[in-house]
């Protein structure tokens, strides 16, 4: 199977699993269920769950055991986008070419849909929800209880006040202010980096990789996460507006400091390239097996949308 | 020790544990930490964690093992209040006589503080956060991994789309509309009842009560949870405004249907009294040991604030 096909196949499995885990649109109360699904199936690239599955696959052919955790990460990522887009936060009307959640469902329902996705992520990581399907007990029940708790900790830590929410809080406070590189580094590593790094670590943990591998891949994840936000800043200047489904130049318009406004476009690309090669170096040890992860790394850091 | 003293002592332990689990106000980023603490220490009655501890105490003198879960329930309750008070939801400026979170910290920070509290609740239920203190490893580490996962499931289920968030979603949709008793029942059992019932069940689970006891106390919790919301509706008509720190008559003002507007004041009190005696009946089996739980039930259902 060529790499593109493999990545596409993994994405299809992720989407099927998300579809299975989410409540049906026709179930009562419909409005909030529709809002949850609207944002989860809005054309996301599934970067975080892909990282989890591909990392697990370095160590085990049974990568599907990481599916519930991979999906939990995507649910948490989606909740964070819904809340970030709210008028009280980034106030965005469009994302990926579609109206944002609060524009379609109203602010109240958008807030609740985010809350529901965050809570569902943790419910998924217990084992009571996995009775009937191929996405359920057949994989997750083979993971031992302590490993599940470790994954819940990693995700809660990366998503919470010491991770994503903490980064977003500083980001919110910094809007319209001059910030230094240190503050930007704090925002980026917390708001985006923490969950990207956790996605990789969790894949390794669930595949029962040894402590050295978890550490090594954690470093890979940290470098990738750092570069990830620089790429986001680059896309705001050079991205393909049609493929992104949103206008470039939003950071400038909102007077939001980013890596480019602080260090310049050239320096941003140099830094991205540096982080890319450092990240690849951590994968060298895994040889040919890491080809899908390497290809994904390249895609993540050199895409134009 | 008389009952009042016992309940006061339990509340003091709950507050100390919450203080230990929450990030410090002086830690960076300060604003969001201050917002989290502002709402958690806003004079709450600690009803849910008390129910957890008192239920555990029916079965074990080692009730402190239930402290992390009891605190997680209070964090989730607090997050739900912060989000409910937002302009896009109930739009309340005051709660317990103090300005609501978004009035003090702004809407963006209030949304994030809620998100942070919800996420921290789940982090607490893993065991990586419990290293240093009497509130930490000394109790929670004695709980086995499967029991922890069961508790995480109970809480996620009660807080999420099949519980609190689902109830709030229907409540939001129903504002300004005529609703029937069935819809009101759905809102109440989900928005308030689910977490109250979970508080009781979790106490029993963590004390390693047998399946029959968990079921029996779950029924007690369900009856209490049902009555709980009726009392909330009664307080909106007859509560002590000074002690509540908010004005009566808000449901009428917001054209929000409640048990009284649908069934009348007399019927509401009759129903509350019925549920009270049914709930007490489920406690009979536990004799004198259940005195604190009985006294709390009376307090919860016959308070004026």
Image: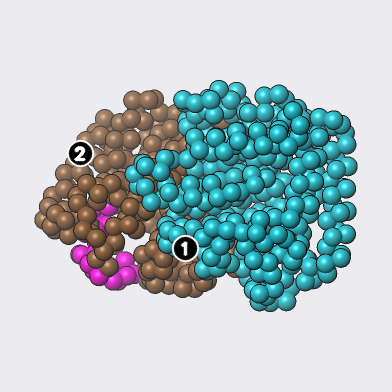
Chain colours: A cyan, B brown
Whether residue B10 is visible to the viewer of this picture, yes or no, is no
Measure the C-alpha gap from mark 2 to mark 1.
46 Å
Position of B96 with respect to A291 (left or right) is left
Task: State whether the magenta stretch is mostly helix, strand or loop.
Answer: helix
Judged from the image, the secondary structure of the residue bearing numbered disc 1 is helix
Q: Residue at left 62%, top 68%?
A: A172
Q: Residue at left 57%, top 41%?
A: A72
Which of the numbered marks, if any, corresponds to residue B18? none
Q: Do the residues at discs 2 and 1 belong to one chain? A: no
Within-10-Å neighbours for mark 2: few <14, some 14–19, many 20+:
some
Name the chain letter of the residue that bears numbered label 2: B
- Of circles 2 and 1, the one toward us is 1
Q: Is residue B231 magenta?
A: yes
Per the rendered image, the range of residues in magenta is B227-253
Residue A105 found in image quarter: bottom left
Question: Which residue occupies the foreground of this view, B231 or A53?
Answer: A53
Q: Residue at left 84%, top 60%?
A: A269
Name the chain letter of the residue that bears numbered label 1: A
Provide the residue designation for mark 1.
A103
Residue at the far left in the pictured view: B266
Provide the residue designation for mark 2.
B278
> In the image, residue A48 lies at what x, y percent?
66, 44
> In the image, residue B124 lies at what x, y percent?
56, 45
């Amino acid at each position: 199977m060529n790499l593109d096909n493999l990545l596409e196949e993994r994405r299809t499995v992720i989407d099927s699993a998300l579809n299975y885990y989410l409540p049906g649109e026709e179930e009562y109360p419909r409005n909030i269920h529709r809002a949850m699904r609207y944002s989860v199936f809005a054309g996301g690239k599934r970067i975080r769950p892909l990282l989890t599955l591909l990392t697990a696959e370095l160590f085990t052919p049974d990568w599907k055991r990481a599916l519930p955790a991979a999906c939990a990460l995507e649910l948490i990522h989606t909740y964070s986008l819904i809340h970030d887009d709210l008028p009280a936060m980034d106030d965005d009307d469009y994302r990926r070419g579609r109206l944002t959640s609060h524009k379609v469902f109203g602010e109240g329902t958008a807030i609740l849909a985010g809350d529901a996705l965050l809570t569902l992520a943790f419910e998924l990581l217990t084992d009571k929800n996995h009775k009937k399907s191929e996405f359920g007990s057949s994989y997750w029940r083979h993971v031992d209880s302590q490993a599940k708790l470790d994954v819940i900790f990693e995700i809660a830590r990366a998503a919470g006040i010491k991770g994503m929410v903490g980064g977003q809080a500083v980001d919110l406070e910094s809007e319209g202010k001059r910030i230094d590189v240190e503050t930007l580094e704090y925002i980026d590593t917390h708001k985006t980096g923490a969950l990207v790094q956790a996605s990789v670590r969790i894949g390794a943990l669930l595949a029962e990789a040894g402590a050295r591998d978890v550490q090594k891949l954690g470093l890979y994840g940290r470098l990738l996460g750092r570069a990830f936000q620089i790429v986001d800043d680059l896309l705001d200047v050079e991205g393909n507006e049609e493929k992104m489904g949103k206008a470039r130049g939003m950071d400038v318009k909102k007077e939001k400091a980013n890596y480019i406004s602080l260090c310049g476009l050239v320096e941003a690309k140099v830094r991205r390239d540096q982080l890319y090669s450092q990240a690849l170096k951590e994968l060298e040890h895994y040889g040919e097996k890491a080809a899908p992860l390497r290809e994904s790394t390249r895609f993540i850091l050199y895409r134009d949308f």
